[in-house]
Amino acid sequence: MNNPQSTAKIADHPIHPMLISFPIAFFVATLGCDLAFWTTGGAAWAQAAIWLLGAGLVMAAFAAVAGVIEILGDGRIRALNDVWWHAGGNVVVVLIELYNWISRYAEGTGAILPKGLILSAISVGILLFTGWKGWEMVYRHRVAVADENDRPRLGSAGRRP
């Protein structure tokens, strides 16, 4: 194995990349709901946004656990500068979105404009950066990319020999 390997995996598939799409999608959708609330004033958008924020936070916690396992599991991963920018930025996003959720829970729709909308936009901006860093780890540093020797060989009938 030449590439840094994933230590949190199911059937040789890294768990962290499987989970991260959920909080990203939920946080981006929150921004979409905030923009819809801003333009329409519809209470359903505010309700959807708080649920999306909550779901994003829960899934971010699962993704973070898998990410920490990855960082602790292979010293070559810990040695990458991109890892720390990726992890640190995502911690900042979670803290911003946690504050965003708490504000909305306590203040209702009054927390959306302009504060919630701004927080959602900042979070999505940071996610663009941390996503870039995450893909740098995969494409440049080949974190969790299977080496040719690690891939199962299939027989002529599509089964492992």
Image (cartoon, rainbow, N blue to C red):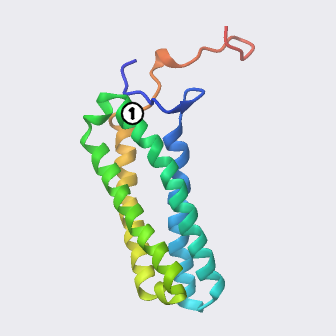
Query: Which quadrant of the figure contains the C terminus?
Result: top right
Q: Nearer the viewer, residue 153 or 125?
A: 125
- Judged from this view, the residue extending furthest toward the top is 161
The residue at 45%/29% (across/down) is 7
Query: Which quadrant of the figure contains the N terminus?
Result: top left
Q: Secondary structure at mark 1?
A: loop
The percent coordinates of residue 54 (x first, y second) are 55, 66
- Judged from this view, the residue extending furthest toward the right is 157
Res 81 → quadrant: top left
- Position of residue 128 relative to residue 86, above or below, is below
- Judged from this view, the residue extending furthest toward the front is 106
- Position of residue 67 relative to residue 120, above or below, is above
The residue at 41%/61% (across/down) is 94
The percent coordinates of residue 63 (x first, y second) are 49, 48
The residue at 36%/20% (across/down) is 2
- Position of residue 4 relative to residue 105, above or below, is above
Q: Count neighbours of disc 1 (C-alpha within 10 A) and say few if under 14, some if 14 to 19, many if 20 or more.
A: many
The percent coordinates of residue 120 (x first, y second) are 44, 73
Q: Does residue 51 appear to the left or right of 79 in the view shown?
A: right
Res 5 → quadrant: top left
Q: Nearer the viewer, residue 29 or 58?
A: 58
Q: Does residue 78 appear to the left or right of 119 in the view shown?
A: left
Label 1 belongs to which residue? 143
The residue at 49%/42% (across/down) is 16
Q: Amino acid at mark 1?
A: Val
Res 67 → quadrant: top left
The percent coordinates of residue 9 (x first, y second) are 53, 31
- Position of residue 155 relative to residue 123, above or below, is above
Q: Nearer the viewer, residue 45 or 149?
A: 45
